Amino acid sequence: MNKRFFTLGLLGASLLLTMCRKAEPFKDEDYDQRLSGGASTVFDESAKAFTHAVGGLSARDARVHTLGDLAFESAFVAAPAPVNGGLGPVFNNVSCISCHHNDGKGSPTAGLRNSSMLFRISIPGQNEYGGPMPVPGFGTQLQDMALLGTRPEAKVNISYENFAVAYDDGEKVQMRRPVYSITDPYTTYTGTAFSPRMAPPVFGVGLLENIPEATLLSFVDENDRDGDGISGKANYVYSPVTKRRQIGRLGFKSNTADVLHQTASAFQQDMGITSYLLPQESCFGQPQYMRLSNQPDIPDSTLQAVAFYLRTLAVPARRDVADPTVLRGQQIFNQLNCSGCHKPVIRTGVHQTMLFLSNQRIQPFTDLLLHDMGADLADGFTDNYATGSEWRTMPLWGIGLFERTNGTAFYLHDGRARSIEEAILWHGGEAERAKEAFRKLPKTDRAALLRFVKSL
Ligand SMILES: [Ca+2]
Ligand SMILES: [Ca+2]
Ligand SMILES: [Ca+2]
């Protein structure tokens, strides 16, 4: 019998059954496994896969999305300028898109036009909101670029030490460990913690923002009562939007609670562009820049449009979901308990105005919680409740498309991994068990797991 008709027949039969019995929710296998972003998932596997608006926006909403898109892609310049002024005086890059390539990831370079790294810094202690303690004269982020006539806060050099890790069957994987050095500080540098970060993708953040807090809290298992070696805890961070501490969702340590704050702080810290939400220049109070005014560099509407643009960026569909190797890989992913952190399926909450965010079944492959990932990935940078070895579970949706959207793909918070294999082999701490189980897999099962991850 034709396979498709057979499945349809089965579906029909089970529908009939459910109609006769009392209403039950569909089994998860009955959902279309390609729809990672719910109903507004887009089907595009090209380099532009992450750049699409969700379907069905009203004419007005589509216009705001386009305005936000333009601001996201614009290279800002020094004030005074007729458009897109206000860059700097210190910054990490001149536009959002120059770090988030094609709305996706960046690459691990510093000090160049297309470099997509920023560097969080601190000294011991906590600020008044429980966040990281600024380094005197430098703040909590090191800006390695500056306008003509001002000095970058410092320069950062990246080099790598190579080593190899062996699978149980003897096959080896080449790995590289990054080494950073800070040179040419504009004044004495006393920072103690240094956290290099490479730009992550920006699609789907509206959906992540709309996951109910209770759902995230249901994943928390701080004392590991179920004994699977995985704890997971929530971060709570101050939001200038709501003026209170909220559960963190964005950033590599879940260090930001909402998309609007993330947008404002990207403008302010990464580009030196102030807004009504964060009206102080990033270098405020530093000896070099005392003279600057604190007038917002961009209008409120621009900030709002960019946040709206991010919230309305669609998630790309999975590929090869019925391929037997992919299905085998999915089984292994669950057996190894990768799914203990990378949650395959989550339901978003109700959203009053943005229906494409409301009550969606999504496949983000993250729990948005903090996990101790071991000494090898630790940066020693504490951020609210996140310790120096804790990281937010990286979402895996779209991961199989990075090679196309970025040309060369890099993985983990600082882009040290050049392949998905390397990224897994860096896992430690709460993920040590899963990593070791992966290292011991027969070659064909390893390949199947990687095929599955690439289908996301
Ligand atoms: Ca500025
Ligand atoms: Ca700074
Ligand atoms: Ca547990």
Image: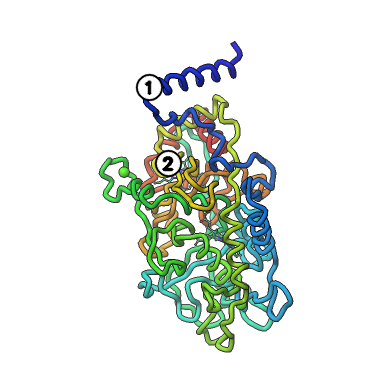
- Counting from the top left corner in percent of width and height, residue 260 is at 52, 63
Disc with the residue nearer the chain's start (1 vs 2): 1
Label 2 neighbour load within 10 Å: few <14, some 14-19, many 20+: many
Q: Nearer the viewer, residue 348 or 422?
A: 348
Which residue occupies the foreground of this view, 158 or 27?
A: 27
Q: Position of residue 96 (x, y in %)?
A: 63, 62
Residue at the (48%, 40%) spot, across then down: 361
Q: Residue furthest right?
A: 82
Q: Determine which residue is flagged by label 1.
A: 21
Image quarter (top left, top right, bottom left or bottom right) of the C terminus: top right
Describe the element under mark 1 as helix, strand or loop: loop
Q: Which mark is residue 435?
A: 2
User: Quadrant for ligand 1?
Assistant: bottom right
Report the residue at 55% width, 45% height from top: 174
Locate residue 227: give its quadrant: top left
- The x and y percentages for residue 132 are 41, 70
* Colouring: rainbow
Q: Amino acid at mark 2?
A: Lys
1 vs 2, front mark: 1
> Residue 316 placed where, x, y %?
60, 43
